[in-house]
Image (spheres, rainbow, N blue to C red):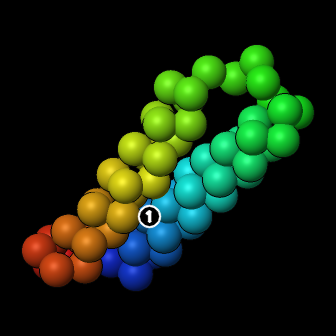
Amino acid sequence: MRSSKLNRIFNQAFGVFLGIAIAVWVLRGFGILTFIPGGVIWLLLLGAIVMAILNYVQKTWWRF
């Protein structure tokens, strides 16, 4: 797998995790998704952070 393709996958995964986390957080704040626990939001944010770190590491340290 080429570096740029892997980089694009990490970027897309970061955007998906962050977008879903923000959407769930906002909808939960409005009272629409009150059944979703706060831990799910934290897991989504943690997933976004992990994807951002992997993206950075892949661009700077992993030389394919």
Q: Viewed as shown, does residue 3 lie left or right of 15?
A: left
Q: Identity of the amino acid at label 1?
A: Phe
Whether residue 34 is situated above or below residue 31 in the rendered picture: above
Can the viewer see residue 37 in this picture?
yes
User: Residue at left 62%, top 21%?
Assistant: 37
Please give left or right for residue 36 compared with residue 51 in the image.
right
* Label 1 packing within 10 angstroms: few (<14), some (14-19), many (20+): many
Q: Residue at x 40, y 73 (%)?
A: 7
Percent from the top left, x then y, of residue 58?
A: 24, 70
| Residue shown at 25% from the left, 79% from the top | 59
Q: Quadrant of the C terminus?
A: bottom left
For the point 50% across and 61% down, the residue is 14
> Which residue carries the number 1 mark?
10
- In the rendered image, residue 12, in percent from the top left (x then y), is placed at 56, 66
Quarter of the view holding residue 30: top right
Q: Is residue 22 above or below residue 35?
A: below
